[in-house]
Structures are given as C-alpha cells and as structure tokens.
Image (cartoon, rainbow, N blue to C red):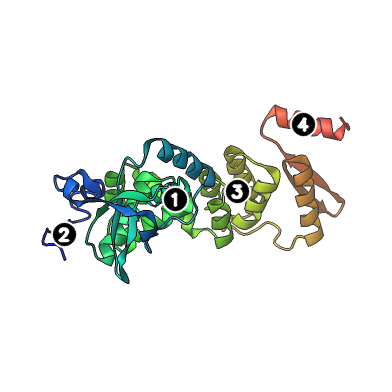
Amino acid sequence: MSDEPRPRIMGRGLGRGLSALLGDGDDAPKNLRHIATELLHPGRFQPRRHFDEESLDALAESVRAQGILQPILVRRNPEDPNTYEILAGERRWRAAQAAQLHEVPVLVRELGDREASEIALVENIQRQDLNPIEEAQGFRRLIEEFGHTQDALATALGKSRSHIANTLRLLNLPDEIQTMIADGRLTAGHARALVTARDPLEIAHEIIALGLSVRQTEGYVRDQDSSRAGKPGGKQSNPHKDPNVTALEQELTQILGLKVTLHADKEGGALSIRYRTLDQLDTVLAKLRGH
C-alpha cells in the first residue's frame, strides 16, 4: 500500500479530481509505467457496454502511427495482483490491442472499489460518447450511489442542468424503448418526446416504421394525445374502439406516413388525415390520384 495520500475523487468538482488522478499532478512521472497489454483487463465498474467498431478502428490507426499519447489509468486487480484493472482508457487499450502493441503506458493508482467506480463513471461521461441510456445510468449512479446533486453534476461535467434532468427522464421509459435508444434506432430527441406520451411503446414502433423526424414525432405525440383525450379528466373519448378499426388506422398511417383516424357514427363515419405542411398534403393528394 502506497504512503501517498489517497486523492479525493470529487474534491471541489468531478473534473478537478479526475484530472489529478489521470496524471496532471507533479507526481505523475514517477507513477508512469509501461505494462504488457495482456496484463490489463476491463474494469468491473465500466459503465460503457457498446464500443463502436468503426470508431475503434480509426483510433487503432492513430495508435499505430503515434502510439498512445495519454496513459491508461489502472489499479492492481484485487483478485489477481499480477494483473491490472482499467479504470479509465478502455478504448485506448482496445485500440492498442487492435494495433498489436505489446506494451501500453499506464498510471497505477491504489484505489478502493468506491473510488474506482466513481472514476469510471466520470471518465466515461466526460470523455466518451456514451449512448443516451448509458449516460443516464451514469448520472443516476453518481446521484444515488455517491450523493451528488443534479446541479453539482451540471457544474462539474460542463453540462446544463436541464440536459441532466431530461437525460435522467429517459430511464422512466419502458425497457424496450431504452433498448431502441441504446442501439440507435431512436435518438434522445425522439425519446424525450415519448416520455409524456400515453402509449410510448406503440408510438416508438410507429416512429421507426415511418422514419419520423424528432419534430414530426413531437407533433405526432401531440396529435395522438389530443385525439385520445376527451373530457378535462383526461378520459379517452372512445376507450372501446373496435380493434379492427385501430388496426386499419395503423395500416393507413403507415401507407400515408401521416396520422390517420377513423370516426364511426350511426350514419357511417369519417376518415381524417392529419398533416402539418402543404408538402405533406400534396404527397397525400398525389397518392390518392395514383401518381
């Protein structure tokens, strides 16, 4: 165990503490080592689950040409002291493997599980392009496990408080939608529009099927909520609509790319097509004319 004082991760702010741990301090040179690539292993607290292959290939090309310019932060593996656990810099390590480097520069720190977990979260949020769900999970862990407020995170991470709050709200969506966001089928903008929707999962599938933009999605959610909302109490105007009619509405919506609603009454019914621009109206007219 080293006699040097254990750094405080948060200190006056997340970024300040992380910079010190990553080697900006005066003691960085004496802690810099070169260790065999195969002795390093991904950290157990790594919040990132998806690594973009194209981005890694580009980084590997850079590593082949210039080497690793910033050391990887590690600690000794508590279960195998002959190996090391990566705390920050897993992408660089993966790129080094792809570039077939035999050794990589590392900074070895003696840290407990709590500190290691916090560093891994902060490093990823600050330095990597996490997908929105991974970012939200990182924010939630920093708040729930380490007691940080949204305001403190916003200041320390250089993000607005509204960004943190809106990102956290994505975790209220159904798991299936979170998976759609994580794998890129839905953007964070689409997802934020779904947070207040009455049936977010149904709309999510329609967004993907119709290829709706974020703005179109926001309008779609407003239209659907308006058509379903009846009296001030928020009750549905027709909660027992024939499922065959609902299926036909969905089929027509997919064909036209616009929201279609069927209204039945004693004399027959009516079909309404919701459009927001004249271009959309022209498209519908062209389809009806068979063009």
| The N terminus - image quarter | bottom left
| Image location (x, y in percent) of residue 264 | 81, 53
Does the image show residue 241?
Answer: yes
Q: Secondary structure at mark 4?
A: helix
Amino acid type, callout 2: Arg
Mark 3 lies on residue:
185
| Disc number lying in front (2 or 3) | 2
| Disc number lying in front (2 or 4) | 2
Query: Which disc, if any, is residue 279?
Result: none
Q: Secondary structure at mark 3?
A: loop
- Mark found first going from the N terminus, 3 or 1: 1
Mark 3 to mark 1 CA distance (whole Å):
30 Å
Horizontal relation, residue 195 to residue 155: left or right: right
- Mark found first going from the N terminus, 2 or 3: 2
Q: Nearer the viewer, residue 220 or 65?
A: 65
Mark 1 to mark 4 CA distance (whole Å):
52 Å
- Mark found first going from the N terminus, 2 or 1: 2
Mark 1 lies on residue:
97
- Mark found first going from the N terminus, 2 or 4: 2
Amino acid type, callout 4: Thr
Q: Nearer the viewer, residue 289 or 14?
A: 14
Query: Which disc, if any, is residue 283?
Result: 4
Residue at horizontal 34 percent and vertical 49 percent from the top: 104
Mark 2 lies on residue:
6
> Are the residues flagged by discs 3 and 1 in contact, CB closer than 8 Å?
no
10 Å crowding of disc 3: few (<14), some (14-19), many (20+): some
Mark 2 to mark 4 CA distance (whole Å):
66 Å
127 w.r.t. 78: above or below: above
10 Å crowding of disc 1: few (<14), some (14-19), many (20+): some
| Image location (x, y in percent) of residue 79 | 32, 72
| Image location (x, y in percent) of residue 45 | 37, 62
Horizontal relation, residue 18 to residue 190: left or right: left
